[in-house]
Amino acid sequence: MTTSTSTSTSTPAPASASASGGGAPTARGYSTAYTVPQSPEEVFAAVTDVRTWWTGVIEGRADGPGAEFTYRHPPEHYSVQRVVAYEPGRRVVWRVTDSELSFVSEPGEWTGSEIVFDITPVADGTELRFTHVGLVPDVECFGACSTAWTHFVDGSLRSLITTGKALPEPW
C-alpha cells in the first residue's frame, strides 16, 4: 500500500434507496467520503479487516453475507452487526441488530440502522463513501457517534488503506 494525500467530505447523507439494496426510501445518515490511490480490492480488504481499524473488542466474523460480529467498547458501546451486503471491491453493508449505548437516554438508538461502505473506482484511485444510515443530527448520539466515526473511518481506516497501519485508540 502506498501513502497518499486524499480528499474528504463529511455531511449528513440525503434520503436514498435502502442501503442494503431494497429500493425503499430510508432516513438520512451521517456520511463521509474520500479518495485514495489504492485499488477497490485493497480498499475492500481494509474495510473488511474490522478488528484492525475499529478499536475495541470485536468477536465474530464480518467476512461474508450473513456473518455477524459484536463490537464492544466498555462501558459506553455494545452493538451486533450482521453483514447484509458483501460485494468484493464494491460494497459492504452491516445492519445493526442489537445495540446498547450507555451515554444516551435511548440505549438502543443504533438498532435497525445500517452502516454502509460504498467503494467506487475513480480516475485517480478509489473513492470510499461511508454512511451510517439513521445517524442524523436529531438522534441523541449524533455528536459523539459522528466524532467517533470521523476518527475510525476518516482516520484509522484511511490510514490502514494508505499506509497499512491503523491509528491507535484516541480515548
Image (cartoon, grey):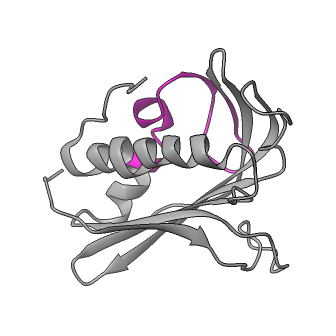
User: Residue 166, image x and y in percent?
Assistant: 31, 35
Q: Residue at x 73, y 66 (%)?
A: 20
Q: Quadrant of residue 97?
A: top right
User: Residue 85, image x and y in percent?
Assistant: 68, 59
Q: Quadrant of residue 16?
A: bottom right
User: Residue 3, image x and y in percent?
Assistant: 13, 53
Which quarter of the image is occupied by the C terminus? top left
Q: Quadrant of residue 120?
A: bottom left
Q: Is residue 170 left or right of residue 133?
A: left
Q: Residue at x 66, y 78 (%)?
A: 14
Q: Does residue 57 belong to the magenta stretch?
A: yes
Q: Is residue 3 left or right of residue 11?
A: left
Which residue is more in the foreground, 91 or 29?
A: 29
Which residue is more in the foreground, 159 or 103?
A: 103
What is the total number of numbered labels drawn onto the structure image? 0
Q: Is residue 83 left or right of residue 119?
A: right
User: Residue 12, image x and y in percent?
Assistant: 59, 68
Q: Residue at x 76, y 52 (%)?
A: 139
Specify the segment rendered in magenta.
46-70
Q: Can residue 129 be seen in the rendering of this structure?
A: no
Q: Name the residue at the top extreme.
A: 75
Relative to 128, residue 109 above or below: above
Q: Residue at x 49, y 37 (%)?
A: 50
Q: Can residue 171 be seen in the rendering of this structure?
A: yes
Relative to 150, residue 120 above or below: below
Relative to 15, residue 115 above or below: above
